[in-house]
Each structure stands twice: as C-alpha cells, then as structure tokens.
Amino acid sequence: MIHGVKTKQLKVHPDARGRLMEVLRRDDDLFLEFGQAYITTAYPGVVKAWHYHKLQTDNLTTLVGTVQIALYDSREDSPTHGEVNVFHTGVHNPLLVQVPPLVYHGFKNVGLEEAVILNVPTLPYRYDQPDEFRVDPHVNDIPHDWNRRDG
C-alpha cells in the first residue's frame, strides 16, 4: 500500500426499508478534519484523472455504480515511490479510500450505469486558488493503464 494511504471497509446495514452505510465519522481512526462533502459522477467508461493536492487529504467512496480508483506515488522521498494502488469500489465492495497530499489519484467508471462518488476532503475548495494539480489521464509517465483487463 502506498505510504499514507488508508482504507476502511464500509458496513452496509440492510433492513426491510432499505440500507444504511456510514462512510466517515469523526471518531474514526481515519478522520483528520472536515473541509466539505461533495459528489461527482462519471458516465460508463469515463476516466477522471490524474490530479493531486499539496495540502488536502481526500476521502473517496463510491455510492452508485462500480469504479476503479487508482493512486500513484510520485513523491521522491516516499518509501513507496513509484507504486500504484488500484481499488475496485462500489455496492459489492463498499470501501473508503483515503488519499494523502501529493499522491496522484483518479478513477474510471467500469460499470454500466452512471457512477456517483462521494468525497469528504479535509479542506474546502478554494475557487480563487485551487489546491489541485492535473496531468492528462492517458498521456503521462504514470505506470497505469485505464483499459480493462480480464483475468
């Protein structure tokens, strides 16, 4: 696992009325601080990647659909420099993925419906000075291929 990345297997509590799933609590070991909560969506086959933050930590989980979340550690001083982590998240694998600052991350909707991803970052988005640094999802030096591989 990339240094500083943490995951939390989420528990779904179903009953005759539906389901309940806690994502992040302030008494969780993973909780750092609250900046904001937002959702983003992606249509089937869409890749939203790559970016990193210098200051904020992201807490990502998939609420609807099936998503491949990928992380890349480009930090020169990290013990896991060059490592890639891939997580398949969604209703069949409810997982919270915590992404520390300076770790590239992104996701691809690998399902057949629009995917809904919840992010609870540690800092609010600053419209005048975004803490977001991007590279092209397909043309870069990150050793990850977003194409599907069976097997």
Image (spheres, rainbow, N blue to C red):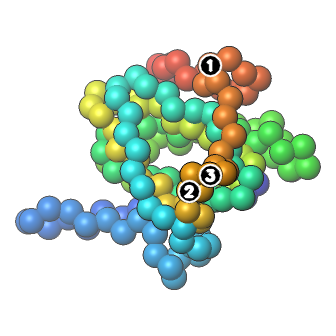
- What residue appears at the point 56 percent right and 56 percent down from the top-left corner? 125
Q: Could you tell me residue 120's position as x and y percent?
A: 49, 61
- What residue appears at the point 28 percent right and 27 percent down from the top-left corner? 112
Image vertical order of residue 81 relative to residue 150, above or below: below
Residue 68: in sight, yes or no? yes
Can you tell which mark lies on residue 76? none
Mark 1 highlights which residue?
138
Quick check: 137 left or right of 82? left
Q: Could you tell me residue 90's position as x and y percent?
A: 37, 45
Image vertical order of residue 85 relative to residue 26, above or below: above
Residue 5: in sight, yes or no? no
Q: Residue 13 is drawn in which quadrant?
A: bottom left
At mark 2, the secondary structure is loop
Q: Residue 113 is drawn in which quadrant?
A: top left
Can you tell which mark lies on residue 125? 2
- What residue appears at the point 63 percent right and 33 percent down from the top-left corner? 50
Q: Which residue lies furthest to the right in this view?
A: 77
Mark 3 highlights which residue?
128
Of badges 2 and 1, nearer the viewer stands 2
Image vertical order of residue 139 relative to residue 26, above or below: above
Q: Residue furthest bottom?
A: 27
At mark 3, the secondary structure is loop
Q: Residue 14 is drawn in which quadrant?
A: bottom left
